[in-house]
Image (cartoon, rainbow, N blue to C red):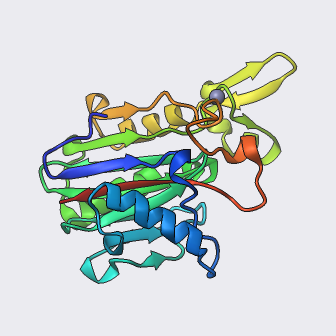
Amino acid sequence: MRLSNKNLVCGISKKDDGSMKLLGNNFDDHVLENRKKFFTQLNIDSKRIVSAGLQHGNNIKIVGQQHAGQFIQNTDGLITNKKNLFLTVTVADCLPIYFYDFKKEVIGIAHAGWQGIVKNIVNKTIQVMTDVYKSGPGNILVYIGPHIQKCHFEIKNEAIKKLNKYSKYFVIKNNKKIFVDLSKIVKEQLLNENVSDNNIEVSRECTYCLNNKYFSYRRDKPKNIKAMIAYIGLK
Ligand SMILES: [Zn+2]
C-alpha cells in the first residue's frame, strides 16, 4: 500500500492468524492469544495496542499513552500523534480506513460499514485531525483496506433507503438485486474533505471472495463474529 514511511507500520491480519474479535466484556483467551502472537511477529508489544469497541457509529476518540492496552467502548475511530501506540479496529467485511498525516505525524484508523458511511465517519475523522492537530487535508494519506466489494455487498430495505443519495454507486443485477460500491462512496466523502485523489488508495480485495484469506461475516454467518484486526502505528 502507498501508506508507507520509515516510522509508520500498518496492515491487517489474515484468516490464518485466527479471529481477533473481542466479544462483549468476556474476552476470549483464545482471541487474546491470537492477538499476542500476531503482534509479536510484527515486533509489536500487544500491550501497546488500543482497540476500538465499534458500534457502527461515527464517534472518534483521541488517544494517548494512557490508553495503551485498552479497549475503548462506543467508538469506531481512533486518532493519535503518539509514538509506539498501535490503533486497531476489527473488520470482517466492513472497511478498515487508515489515515496518515505525513506532515504532522498524526495517524488514525476507522471502522466503516454502511451505517458508519451513512453517518460519514470519514468526514468526522478528517475534522478531528484538522481541528485538533491542524492537519491539512492535502497532507493526509488514506488507505481503504480489504472489505466486501460490489461483487458481494447486496443491500436491502433500510440500507437502500439510507444510501439512496449515493445511488450512482449502486449496481443492479439480474433480478433487481441491488449491490453497492462502498469504497466509491468513501472516496467521494474524502474528496469532499479535500483529501487529494492521489493520496487515496483502495484495496481491490473482497473479503467475501477470498475465502482462504479473510473472514467474511456475510459469507460465513457465524454465531460468534470472527474478524481480522487492522492496525496502524508510529514507531
Ligand atoms: Zn466479492
**At which x and y percent is residue 57?**
57, 62
From the image, which quarter does the C terminus lie in? bottom left
Residue at 30% from the left image edge and 69% from the top image edge: 45
Location of ligand 1 given as a quarter of the image: top right
Q: Nearer the viewer, residue 87 or 35?
A: 35
**At which x and y percent is residue 43?**
26, 59
Q: Nearer the viewer, residue 53 or 230?
A: 230
From the image, which quarter does the N terminus lie in? top left
**At which x and y percent is residue 35?**
46, 64
Location of residue 134 with respect to 208 vertically, above or below = below
Considering every residue shown, the one lying at the far right of the view is 175
Q: Is residue 139 visible?
A: yes
Q: Quadrant of residue 207?
A: top right
Residue at 47% from the left image edge and 59% from the top image edge: 89
Report the number of numbered marks.
Answer: 0
**In the drawing, does residue 167 fall left or right of residue 230?**
right
Q: Is residue 75 visible?
A: no
Location of residue 5 with respect to 81 vertically, above or below = above
Residue at 60% from the left image edge and 32% from the top image edge: 210
Q: Quadrant of residue 166?
A: top right
**At which x and y percent is residue 158?**
78, 48
**In the drawing, does residue 102 fall left or right of residue 141?**
left
Residue at 31% from the left image edge and 29% from the top image edge: 197
